[in-house]
Amino acid sequence: MVEFGGWEMPIQYPSGIIEEHLATRKGSGLFDVSHMGRFILTGRGSTEFLQHVLTNNVKALDIDHVGAQYTIIANESGGAIDDAYLYHFSEDEYVLVVNAANRTKDWKHFQTILKKFDDVCLEDRTEETVMIALQGPASRSILEQVMESGSLPEPKRNSIGNIRIAGHTFRISCTGYTGEPICFELFAKREVGPATWDLLIEQGAAPIGLGARDTLRLEAGLPLYGHELGKDPEGGEIPIMACPLARFAVSFSSLKGDFLGRESLSQQFDAMKKILERDYSGNRVLPRLIRAMVVTGRGIGREGAKVFKADKHVGYITSGTRIPYWSFEGNGPNSKQTSEHNLRSICLAYVECDVLEGEKVMIDIRGKYIDAVVVPHHIRSDVPPYARPIIYR
């Protein structure tokens, strides 16, 4: 147990990080994510307020279909104050989930802007509610066993719904931060949390701590604020568009108007289009990008380690460790998960924009240069029910 964002959190349970990671990928992992900040917004002006302070298009949310979206709280220079998830479970209310460590900072940021908008009520309900994530291939069947009424969301990412478990109402969404194609997050009143946790464990879910939560999101290539978003190892600001997933969190829809950071993000977007065409003339705006890497030599690329292309220093590792993965037999959609697992060293790195997929680089690990290669992804999640590892050979 450790202090984390003002909460006492488990790094791991008795089975350990490796077993927890594997249990999520094979069956179902249960995460207590109640430490995440939960802000409730109501009032006629809440939609326009959120359109202004968030990067995604709030008006694209539909409570009958796709009612959740990944988004960024941006500053004027196009950097991230925080990344967040927005949920629209009912017509008159939004739920914004922010990182635990940034909860106070985000709240203060919003307070400076609220006075410019009429009829917006912003409440911090973090300590009044519970938030549980159930992730992995068996997650849907586990919920079907305990659900008394309601209907689970459509098997489509970001869809939402309402269900009842043990006499209590839960808001539920097909979201999560593990890369699992079958994933759920549940919201309810604080007092029903412990009993619900125990019930899901009884049905076969494995409790997962912070350690495996990090290895799972790393394997999925998902950014973590303070690593792939925020400040880089040199103290500079990481542009939002430098992070692949963050690009899906930015909308330039006319419905948004002139939101915070729009001009800077538009410049970053134009620079990214040039980079995709191998035109690096916009590298002043977007000098480096977050890339996935596999360590092919003997060693582990950890946060802060320098990355070299030939003899040139081109960036830093932002997240990295050795993670487990299940072996699969066959190829493509018909491949089958086996009972065998192995370990591999993977990382995410913030490197110069002309470092391309497939290129070989070197990582400085305590003065020793270790071979690595830039890859598109570490897993693929487009063929349920399993997230399949992409193994570089």
Image (spheres, helix red, strand yellow):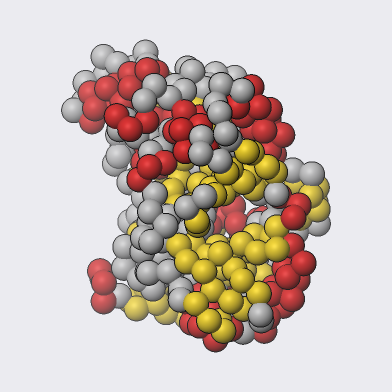
Q: Nearer the viewer, residue 349 or 119?
A: 119
Q: Is residue 338 above or below residue 251?
A: below
Query: For the C terminus, which image quadrant?
Result: bottom left
Query: For the N terminus, which image quadrant?
Result: bottom right
State the residue at coordinates (57%, 34%).
119
Q: Nearer the viewer, residue 351 or 364?
A: 351
State the residue at coordinates (60%, 57%).
213
* Residue 91 coordinates in the image, percent (x, y): 47, 52
Q: In this view, does 362 lie to the left or right of 127?
A: left
> Exactly how many numbered labels are in the figure?
0
* Residue 101 coordinates in the image, percent (x, y): 69, 39
State the residue at coordinates (26%, 14%).
281
Q: Is residue 66 above or below residue 137?
A: above
User: Is there any visible trace of residue 300 in the rendered image?
Assistant: no
Q: Residue furthest left?
A: 277
* Residue 64 coordinates in the image, percent (x, y): 38, 61
* Residue 173 coordinates in the image, percent (x, y): 49, 62
